[in-house]
Amino acid sequence: MIKSFILSGVGLLTLLFILYKSISSFIIEQEIQKARLLAHTLLYTREYLAKVAPFVEVKNKKFHPFSLTPAYAVSQIAKTIQMKEHLYVKQTSDKYRDPQNKPNEHELTAIYYFKSHPNAKEFFQIHRGHENIKSEHLFYAYPLKIDRSCLKCHGPKKDIPKPLLNKIEKIYGDRAFGYKLGQIRGIISIKIPFSEIKHKVDILFLKLSLFLLFLYLLGIVLFTRINKLIFKDIDNINEYLQTKLAKNIYRPFKAKMNFFEFDIIKKGINSVVKSLKNYQKTLYKSLYYNELTGLPNRKKLIEIIKRKNYPLILLDIDSFKEINYFYGEEIANKLIKQVAERLRDYRTFHIKIDEFVILQRENISKDEIYELTKNLIKKLEEPYDIDDYSIIVKFRAGIAYTKRNFMRALSALDATRILNKDIAFCSEADQIRDSYQEHLIWLKKLKIAIEHNKIIPFYQPIYDQNRKICKYEALVRLIDEDGNVISPYFFLNVAKKSRLYFEITKQVIDKSFKKFEKNGTEFSVNLSTLDMENDNIKNFIIQKLKGFKNPKKISFEIVESEDIKNSKNAYEFIQQLKSFGCKILIDDFGSGYANFDYLLSLGADGLKIDGSLIKNILEDKNSQIVVNTIVNFAKEVNMQVIAEFVENEEIFEYLKNLGIDCFQGYYFSEPKEDIEI
């Protein structure tokens, strides 16, 4: 609270400071307005006299001959104001005729200002006065410009009537002639003592300060009182929470509140307490039974099988999310209820929205539980008539038989998806787990190889019909810790299931580009749909191509598959590669998915006939027909044809006679770490 008072005090002082500045600005503006009004009054007086003076002649010798001229009359008025009102008012000029109207330095500054700023309408400053006024004051100046009436006395001498000119020269001498229309003749100078301004500011500031101080003290008193009552209400609430709710004592909160807002909190607390009482009554049911079906839930199941091991059948509805999405939550819930109803005759537990567990007797045989599960699935897969729909669903089942616990049943259910079966035992899940262990071993080898730069591209030459090397294909190899060269057959699928695959792609591309940058020989690297769907890999390749001297020497071999046909990203990336001049080759063409229209749509530059068609081509009539068809098509559309798996002289000669352009295989050379120069 002390901190609040200090902050509020600082705030008050800041407010007073701002208030003082604002009042000062306001009062100064008022004084400027007063000076402005006085200057305008004198100006309008001059204008009136300028109209009247030519028609009035002063005959009384007691009065000055020019008593009714604007300059003289206004000067006399100014002297009268200065004498009676104690306010400095003066009409002055840098070319004064009356020595009493000689300007001081500040007035000269104002005159020069108006001369350099012809459009300025006023000038004011706050500064020390001249010898007549010692205190600080507000200085205001208003410009006096030559109009047509002024030229009668102040214009060129030749234009002034001779009698008037003689009279002026006799009284004032040869001064203040030769002005032109619109020139600055002088100023009306007004000085208001700043002591008067300060006095007004201080009086107004004092009144407002006292009023604000009163409000501040009143606020402190009210704040202290209200704060005390607020803390009393808070203490009552806090005491109730600590002594009752924290100890699970759900009694009504009856303390009287001082504020309406805390009364609302009190009602809210009592409402929560009432809900908690009701919740206590339903807690057991919600803990152990599924709300939708009323069947015992997973928690209840776990408690039971902790006491005794039973064989478990874990049933799962296939693609329930799609059912829920397509038919909506209401229909999906009705479906779950009907599934539960069909399972009422069994010892059934509702585990998740789409999972049910059935406990079986301890002495049931493996064959019996399998037949029971098969019949149960058949029963559950009969159509469900819900509203206007007849819904058919598929089920899977995982059976925990030898090792009887829920997690084993869950593993068996997972195995059904991997094995693509409707029913699986936990023993089958064990076999899958063994394959996972093999997977982990290769994953470890991959990590070590990547960390130690042991992912190496080997290069297999590709020969033309004259048995000359026309290009190389970069093929990935892994060098293990014992120095063995490992084929991608053993590790590539493992890599694709992890994030390591893209690092392999990067290393092969990086090392291949460096190898052939200086050599200048054509080469090709392999890309998968995975690579072409990955923005990081695509950006990596584009940057490498931008830095490569001759991208036209590079071919990208793309494995033919249904995935790439349906990939818009892959298609766009292929077009981007072609824009660099790179060639696109379709790898393993004819390996089960051969689409000539797809070849044309990609704009492929060539294709590599799959090795499965080449290695048996001398004996297999079907392979001969397929290869011949592919070659004829390629020639028609001007595509290069490369044959893989050329293992001997006979195959080479046969393919050469078919008109195949290039050849690759162990007949010529196995993949090697280096290339022939």
Image (tube, grey):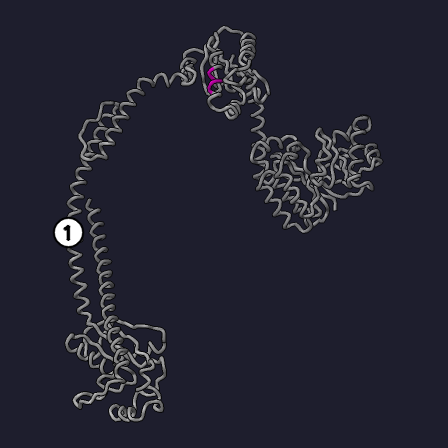
Q: Position of residue 183 (x, y in %)?
A: 35, 80
- Most distant residue in the top direction: 363
Q: On the picture, is 369 further left or further right than 111?
A: right
Q: On the picture, is 296 further left or further right than 597?
A: left
Q: Which residue is mark 1?
A: 214
Q: Residue at x 34, y 85 (%)?
A: 179
Q: Secondary structure at mark 1?
A: helix
Q: Main secondary structure of the magenta part?
A: helix
Residue closest to the eye, 668 or 52 = 52
Residue closest to the eye, 112 or 592 = 112
Q: Position of residue 660 (x, y in %)?
A: 80, 37
Rendered view: 187 above or below 354? below
Rendered view: 104 above or below 374? below
Q: On the picture, is 489 further left or further right than 35?
A: right
Residue range (magenta):
333-337
Q: Residue at x 24, y 70 (%)?
A: 37
Residue closest to the eye, 451 or 600 = 600
Q: Is residue 334 magenta?
A: yes
Location of residue 111 by image quarter: bottom left
Location of residue 505 by image quarter: top right
Q: Residue at x 77, y 40 (%)?
A: 637
Amino acid on which disc 1 is placed = Phe
Residue closest to the eye, 453 or 133 = 133
Rendered view: 429 above or below 49? above
Q: Position of residue 152 (x, y in %)?
A: 32, 86
Q: Position of residue 283 (x, y in %)?
A: 34, 19
